[in-house]
Image: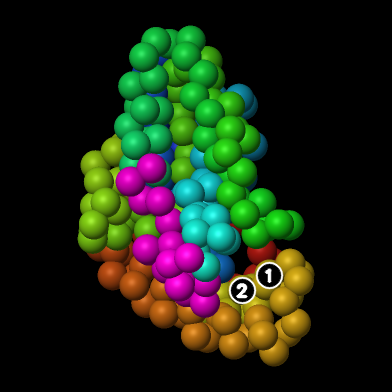
Amino acid sequence: MEPHRLVDRARRLVTPGRRRILGIAGPPGAGKSTLAAHLVDHLDGLAVLVPMDGFHLAGAELERLGRTDRKGAPDTFDASGYAALLARLRTPGSRDTVVYAPVFDRAIEEPVAGSIAVPGPHDVPLVVTEGNYLLHDEGPWALVRDLLDEAWYLELGQEERVRRLVDRHERFGKPRPAAERFVHASDEANARLVAEGRDRADLVVTLAPGPDRP
């Protein structure tokens, strides 16, 4: 589907004064954050982006749990916290209530709380959220799907997706051999798990290989 058609579909979710949530799922490197940002940029102030990655567990907690080398797996996120935030975003209390959401800062590889201000539904009726596990159905992740008014699954050819992942890890500080090892050992295991939720999406968006943009 062409980018402008995706923007039009997202725009149809906008209901003035009512909060709705669009979720974009897909494997690591598929282009979820790029597409989500594109939608928000083209919705004329009617939408805000709240990524799932803000709920990464902190590095110190991953080390305590012995999960550092599995960073990005479902149990390396605060899934219950993410579901609770989505529930709060759906019903913020009043049309003027501002809800704050975290982001994941790749420069420091840590989540940062209170980074995204989400105005009430009177001002911003649509929240766009994106992440690997929006369609995952195990543990607290199973709560997420029912909190989304619409869910899209984004997919990209494996060769292109792996290339993007390796480039991303290298860009944020990993030597290329280490980036390649991490992608093949961790990211690809997570990708196979993410793919199991594909059939729970309302729309499957298949991207053609090319520049990392919608």
Q: Secondary structure at mark 1?
A: helix
Q: Indicate the amino acid at tag 2.
A: Leu
- Image location (x, y in percent) of residue 34: 61, 53
Does 164 sit left or right of 28 as displayed?
right
| Picture quadrant of residue 160 | bottom right
Q: Which residues are magenta?
A: 64-81
Residue position marked by numbered label 2 in the rendering:
165
Task: Sort mark 1 into few (<14), some (14-19) or many (20+) by Cα contacts within 10 Å.
Answer: some
Name which residue type carries label 1. Answer: Arg
Q: Nearer the viewer, residue 36 or 166?
A: 166
Position in image of residue 130 (x %, y %) = 47, 50
**Residue 71 within the magenta-colored segment of the rendering:** yes
Disc 1 marks which residue? 168
**Count of picture labels:** 2
**Quadrant (top left, top right, bottom left, bottom right) of the C terminus:** bottom right
Q: In the rendered structure, are the residues bearing label 2 and label 1 in contact, judged by CB atoms less than 8 Å apart?
A: yes
